[in-house]
Image: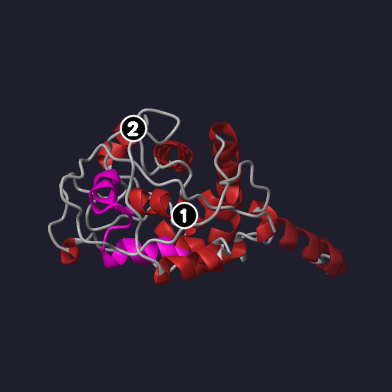
């Protein structure tokens, strides 16, 4: 009888070892979005370096556009981390908008094209990213769409550029001039534009439909995203909506005002 008891007796420290080994590491208790946020910063850094766009700017745009949700989809079909429309994705060679590396690469290329188009004027770049190049050219500044204005303010706020936000809210839009920019204009739809210029500010695009993943964006710290690889230079010039100037064509480009993004 004693022999049988000995055969079935297992020391407690041995039992604890086997129990722990079957459970595996305790990674499942960590929020999945916190683990997924790290690769996103890698993709951001790679694309920002590749195209010479400030890393902080890319991070701020993603935070405002999708809150770091790679599956965010808007009512108008803008998809992914940087909320690319189908036409924008096609222009920049993005085949799968739900694929994070492709989406970020296409979005950063879009930002680069807009920076060249509008001579690094950050408010105009952001307005064109949200509403499209044509409305920015027609209105001679930031279009009077509530969503677009909020988008520009929110991105500038995330960049810590309070002066630019204050100027944007206080000043009127300057007239645009032709011949600016380092590259020929690329007429493409924005992340939200449907291809036609809205006739009324009420026709502005809706915000994306997405789950609440704000915690994920909070976990992308300044230490992960603080090393900007490029700068937007010059003085920030704020822009409030103006009535559509008569005779302004869609080929006009942005003013000379530029914005500095300072590393923390």
Q: Quadrant of the N terminus?
A: bottom right
Tally of marks:
2
Q: State how far apart marks 1 and 2 are (Cα).
A: 22 Å
Q: Quadrant of residue 212?
A: bottom left
Q: Nearer the viewer, residue 243 or 114?
A: 243
Q: Nearer the viewer, residue 36 or 136?
A: 136
**Which numbered disc covers residue 185?**
2
Q: Position of residue 88 (x, y in %)?
A: 31, 38
Q: Which residue is mark 1?
A: 61
Q: Nearer the viewer, residue 152 or 178?
A: 178
Span of residues in magenta: 130-154
Local SS, label 2: loop
Indicate which label's residue lies in the foreground, 1 or 2.
2
Within 10 Å of disc 2 (Cα), the crowding (few <14, some 14-19, many 20+) is some
Q: Is residue 59 magenta?
A: no
Q: Is residue 243 above or below residue 192?
A: below
Sequence-earlier tag: 1 or 2: 1
Q: Is residue 80 above or below residue 14?
A: above
Which is the main secondary structure of the residues drawn in magenta? helix
Q: Is residue 132 magenta?
A: yes
Q: Residue at x 57, y 54 (%)?
A: 37
Q: Quadrant of residue 264?
A: bottom right
- Asked if residue 26 lies left or right of residue 170, the reply is right
């Amino acid at each position: 009888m004693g022999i049988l008891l000995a055969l079935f007796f297992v020391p407690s420290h041995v039992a604890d070892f086997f129990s722990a080994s079957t459970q595996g590491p305790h990674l499942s208790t960590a929020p999945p979005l916190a683990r997924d946020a790290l690769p996103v910063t890698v993709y951001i850094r790679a694309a920002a370096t590749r195209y010479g766009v400030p890393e902080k700017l890319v991070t701020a745009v993603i935070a405002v556009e999708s809150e770091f949700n790679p599956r965010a989809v808007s009512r108008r079909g803008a998809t992914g981390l940087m909320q690319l429309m189908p036409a924008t994705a096609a222009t920049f060679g993005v085949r799968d908008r739900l694929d994070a590396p492709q989406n970020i690469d296409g979005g950063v290329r879009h930002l680069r094209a807009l920076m060249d188009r509008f001579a690094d004027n950050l408010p105009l770049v952001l307005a064109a990213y949200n509403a499209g190049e044509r409305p920015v050219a027609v209105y001679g500044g930031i279009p009077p769409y509530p969503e677009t204005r909020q988008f520009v303010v929110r991105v500038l706020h995330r960049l810590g550029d309070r002066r630019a936000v204050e100027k944007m809210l206080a000043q009127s839009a300057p007239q645009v001039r032709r011949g600016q920019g380092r590259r020929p204009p690329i007429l493409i739809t924005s992340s939200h534009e449907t291809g036609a210029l809205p006739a009324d500010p009420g026709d502005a695009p809706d915000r994306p439909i997405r789950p609440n993943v704000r915690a994920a964006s909070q976990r992308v710290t300044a230490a992960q995203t603080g090393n900007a690889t490029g700068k937007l230079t010059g003085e920030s010039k704020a822009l409030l909506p103006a009535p559509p100037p008569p005779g302004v064509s869609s080929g006009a480009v942005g003013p000379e005002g530029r914005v500095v993004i300072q590393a923390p």
